[in-house]
Image: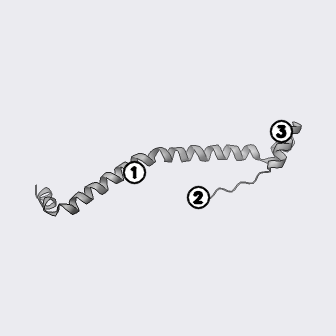
Amino acid sequence: MIFLFFFDAKDYIEGINDNNEVLIDLSRFSDFISELNQFIKDKDKLAQLDTPIRRVLDDVLEVKQWFVNNPQQDQITFDT
């Protein structure tokens, strides 16, 4: 996913320095900050899942490797 956002940092800085709300609004910097914060929240939710998913994948790979290394046990397991 690509996020494309246009803002004018110079207008924002001048608007802050001159206390000019028109320049601040025209800069669209506050919109950029809002979208950036939402992006960070969304990524944080995914990041929280990263470790549990990696642990499950590691366990699955470990079980798979066990069956590869123990083909006789594999047959016994499925026969019971």
Q: Quadrant of residue 30?
A: top right
Q: Secondary structure at mark 3?
A: helix
The quadrant of the image that shows the N terminus is bottom right
79 sits to left or right of 11: left
Amino acid type at mark 2:
Met
Image point (68%, 57%), residue name: 4
| Residue lying at 40% horizontally and 46% vertically, measured from the top left | 52
Colouring style: one colour
Is label 1 in a helix, a strand or a loop?
A: helix
Q: Earlier in the sequence, mark 1 or mark 2?
A: 2
Residue 20 visible in the snapshot: no
Residue 59 visible in the snapshot: yes
Q: Residues within 10 Å of mark 1 (few under 14, many from 20)?
A: few
The residue that label 3 is drawn on is 16
In this rendering, would 2 be left or right of 10?
left
* Left or right, residue 7 beside residue 57: right
Q: Looking at the image, is mark 2 or mark 3 earlier in the sequence?
A: 2
Q: Which residue is mark 1?
A: 54
Considering depth in this image, is 52 or 69 the residue closer to the camera?
A: 69
Q: Amino acid at mark 1?
A: Arg
Residue 66 percent coordinates (x, y)? 22, 57
Whether pointer 3 and pointer 1 mark residues with C-beta atoms closer than 8 Å, the reply is no
Q: Earlier in the sequence, mark 3 or mark 1?
A: 3
> x, y (%) of residue 6?
75, 54
| Residue denoted by label 2 | 1
Q: Amino acid at mark 3?
A: Ile
Residue 32 against residue 79 in the figure, above or below = above
- Rounded to the nearest angstrom, the CA distance separating label 2 from label 3 is 32 Å
